[in-house]
Amino acid sequence: MSVYIKQLSKEDEKNQKLFDFISNLPVDDSGGFRNPWHYTEGHENFSEWIDLMLKIDKGEYIVEREAKQHSIYWIYIEQIPIGIGKIRQLTEEEKKFAGHIGYYIAPPYRGKGFATEVTKLLIAEAKQNKNIEKVIISIEPENLASRRIAEKCGAKLEKIIENVAYKYTI
């Protein structure tokens, strides 16, 4: 099984599997993933939610505690959504505390190497299509799995920020 990423689009509002996945995403995850746009409405409002996400992608709507602009990617295996990824366009100020890449893999798919593959895909996407020359990955210190993944993908530890984050760069 190979993993792939697909950027959010208006067509996603018709995807029942994606709707089911999004409806069950946690607000917070023990790995540090924060979902500021937790979706709990019925399917009839999913189109509006997709429109809001597309505005966030363009920087037209800002979410509290998030970078001003970030692109959303669905993570799939064989047309089954297993996670969500983000590539953030960071201002110089945001680079002090945030990373360009974030992801969430649903618990049944963890420990199978998918996060490493997704991280590689997001790094390539950030460099090739988002014009990010130096990709920053910010990881909470206790998240050893994500730190190992970043290192497997060629990231180098640049600094530790006051026991709040390990900052890696590629």
Image (cartoon, rainbow, N blue to C red):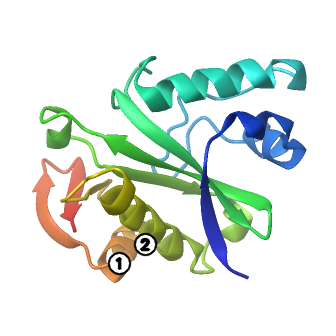
The mark nearer the N terminus, 1 or 2, is 2
Q: Secondary structure at mark 2?
A: helix
Residue 53 in view of the camera: yes
- As drawn, 19 above or below 48: below
In this picture, residue 11 sits left or right of residue 167: right
Q: Amino acid at mark 2?
A: Lys
- As drawn, 31 above or below 153: above
How far is disc 1 from disc 2 in space, using C-alphas? 6 Å
Question: Looking at this view, is 60 or 151 the one in front?
Answer: 60
The answer to which image quadrant residue 11 occupies is top right
The residue indicated by pointer 1 is 153
Q: Residue at x 34, y 26 (%)?
A: 68
Give x and y (percent) for residue 140. 32, 53
Q: Residue at x 25, y 73 (%)?
A: 155
User: Disc 1, disc 2: CB below 8 Å?
Assistant: yes
In this picture, residue 47 sits left or right of residue 14: left
- As drawn, 137 above or below 114: above
Give x and y (percent) for residue 63. 44, 21
